[in-house]
Amino acid sequence: MARKVLIEHDQETLRIFTGYALTYTTQYANQLGLDNQLPLSKRQFSGDSATASVPFRQHLRDTAIRVIARSAFVANSGHTDCFQSIEELTRTSRSGLHLSDNAIPSLSYITATRNDNSQEHLALNAYLLDFYMHGQVAALAAANGKSSLSSRLCSPNSSIP
């Protein structure tokens, strides 16, 4: 139950920050300039104006996926401005839009499951989950079968190994 709430929180956070990115990019498009910089090498490219009217190039322009916040280079792979995670939003945003997943409040690292492919994710700690659900030391101790936990947490001179 708590994991579901945390995942819903992450989805809402992603929705909000995607909205911020789309709004900012739309409002400051002139200041951001063209998205013509390769993400890794940072090399800039520009189209050849002599071939701008070639039918093939016109067809590519007409059928291109229109993106606002996502890098045009990532959009070449079929991706739109719909992001699946905060990490994806920050990693694939267009040049000039500086987003950091460390600055966006996400709990995806602790709500991960063993089925997730990334080894950077941590599984949600059961004690933390129980304390989040109950908010009481006695309930935490009872739920985890730790009868001495309550007395050790309440004692000012003791520490929990």
Image (tube, rainbow, N blue to C red):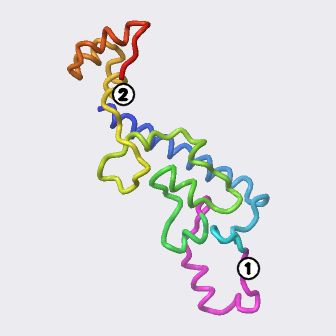
96 displayed left or right of 85? right
Write the residue at 49% across / 57% down. 82
Instruction: Indicate whether 130 appears above or below 57.
Output: above
Q: Position of residue 142 (x, y in %)?
A: 22, 16
The mark lying in front, picked from 2 and 1, is: 2
Give the residue furthest to the left: 145
Please give the label number shown on residue 46: 1
Pick whichever of labels 2 and 1 is earlier in the sequence. Answer: 1
Position of residue 114 relative to residue 146, above or below, is: below
Query: Are there few (<14), some (14-19), or many (20+) residues within 10 Å of tag 2?
Result: few
Q: Indicate the position of residue 143 as horizontal and vertical percent values.
A: 23, 21
Mark 1 residue type: Ser
The residues colored magenta run: 44-70
In the picture, the quarter occupied by the C terminus is top left
Lateral position of residue 13 relative to residue 154, left or right: right
Which disc, if any, is residue 128?
A: 2
Q: Residue at x 74, y 87 (%)?
A: 48
Reply above or below: 87 against 130. below
Asked whether residue 87 is drawn in magenta, I would say: no
Measuring from the top left, give residue 133's x and y in whole percent. 33, 23
Q: Of 70 and 113, which appears nearest the observer?
A: 113
Instruction: Find numbered disc 2 in the image and state the secondary structure of the residue it sits on.
Output: helix
